[in-house]
Image: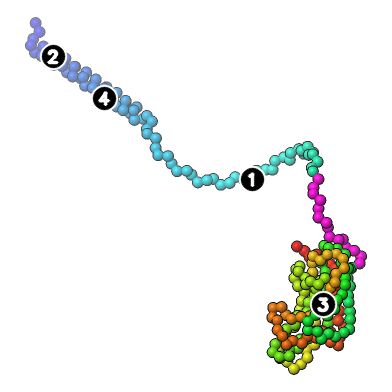
Amino acid sequence: MISRGSLMIALSVLLLSALISAMVKSDDEKESQCQQCQCSSSGTGIPGIPGQHGLPGRDGRDGIDGINGKPGEKGEKGDSGAKGEVGLPGPGNELNWKHCVWFGESSSDVGLIKECRFVKKSPATAIRVLYQGTLRTLCKSGSCCNRWYFTFNGNECGSPATIEGIKYGGPASDDPHRVTQIEGHCEKLPAGTISVGFYVGKCIRSPRDHHDAYSGWNAMSRIVIEELPPPQT
């Protein structure tokens, strides 16, 4: 028969064996759970906040020129253009000019001093006029002003402006005759005979009485007229 002591030893061995087996099983389960946690933690997380755009890159280098293409086909003939404007007269061998020269004095304060007729060849050209001679303004009292000017067929030049000269004076005891030159150009005059007049009168912008004008004293006087191409635009 088995003794009581042996039985107790056997039971103790069995209990110890069961306890060891339970402890090993518990460690295996913990290890399995840990592996699952690690596996779960290594999965894809929540997307982060988008970052800001980077700075623009620098321009690249210029490329190499490509090969020239083949010539295209000849196009159809275009429509004829509108007729151009009449051109300026070409340069000739002779200039168109004239001068009127005289010796004579005029004491007129207002009116025509001299008329000179000129034949203009083209409506597209301009006329240059020049007067040269002695002029004087003498004040009878106070100050005075006289104006000498050109006319064309009875009218002063309107393009670009009048052609004139003035003499202004104050009380004086001398008689100031001076050689004077008045010159200018006039445009937009028709072709044909032009009556060029040289006049004396009161000053437009400062009309004053008590003036005593004198033209052509003791010297030759002349008017020169010349036809010229129009000025540059």
Q: Earlier in the sequence, mark 1 or mark 2?
A: 2
On the image, the x and y values in percent for residue 78 come to 79, 42
Q: CA distance from mark 4 to mark 3?
A: 131 Å
Residue at x 34%, y 27% (from the top left corner): 39
Residue 11 circle label: 2
On the image, the x and y values in percent for residue 131 come to 83, 78
Query: Which residue type carries mark 2?
Result: Leu
Query: Which residue type carries mark 3?
Result: Phe
SS at circle 2? helix
SS at circle 1? loop
What are the residue bounds of the magenta stretch?
Answer: 80-94
Query: Which residue type carries mark 1?
Result: Asp
Q: Nearer the viewer, mark 1 or mark 2?
A: 1
Q: CA distance from mark 1 to mark 2?
A: 95 Å
Please tell me how crowded label 4 is: few (under 14), some (14-19), or many (20+) other residues with Cα within 10 Å. Answer: few
Residue beneath label 3, please? Answer: 198
Q: CA distance from mark 1 to mark 3?
A: 72 Å
